[in-house]
């Protein structure tokens, strides 16, 4: 679970994003000081570096959509993806066979 310091930095970053202000370590520190929260000096810079190139508003709006942040596959790989989908049921059947063999060993654990 995240510490109070980490949560405070995340909330500060969300406030800055909501206001349309560029997220920098200095601005995060100013918000934290205004709120009376003391954090280790390395945390704001660490979070700002982690958020570089990330569109937080898109990240928030896509939570729970199942879309994830992975880029879309190119159209040329669509046939390969379709072939992979067709092969998956066969692989599942094989896995089920292996499980059934492991389950029936001729004796029980507590016999």
Image: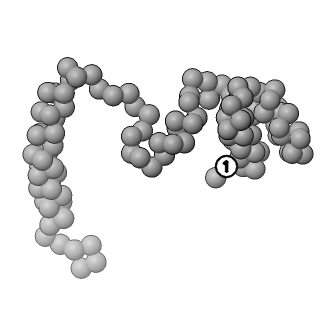
Q: How many marks?
A: 1
Assign the C terminus to one quadrant of the image. Answer: bottom left
Relative to 103, 43 lies left or right: right
Relative to 104, 56 lies left or right: right
* Residue 71: quarter of image: top left
Q: Position of residue 100 (x, y in %)?
A: 14, 61
Give the residue at x 13% y 70%: 106
Outermost residue to the top? 76
Give the residue at x 39% y 40%: 67
According to the picture, the residue beneath numbered tag 1 turns out to be 2
Which SS class for mark 1? Answer: loop
Q: Position of residue 33 (x, y in %)?
A: 88, 39
Name above or below for residue 49 compared with residue 92. above
Outermost residue to the bottom? 111
Q: Nearer the viewer, residue 68 or 94?
A: 68
Residue 38 seen from this side: no
* Residue 12: quarter of image: top right
Q: Nearer the viewer, residue 73 or 22?
A: 22
Q: Position of residue 37 (x, y in %)?
A: 86, 45
């Amino acid at each position: 679970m995240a510490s109070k310091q980490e949560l405070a930095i995340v909330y500060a970053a969300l406030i800055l994003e909501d206001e349309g202000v560029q997220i920098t370590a200095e601005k995060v520190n100013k918000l934290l000081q205004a709120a009376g929260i003391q954090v280790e000096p390395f945390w704001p810079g660490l979070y700002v570096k982690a958020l570089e190139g990330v569109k937080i508003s898109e990240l928030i709006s896509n939570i729970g959509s199942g879309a994830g942040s992975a880029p879309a596959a190119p159209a040329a790989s669509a046939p390969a993806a379709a072939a992979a989908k067709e092969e998956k049921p066969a692989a599942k059947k094989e896995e089920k066979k292996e499980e059934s063999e492991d389950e029936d060993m001729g004796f029980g654990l507590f016999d």
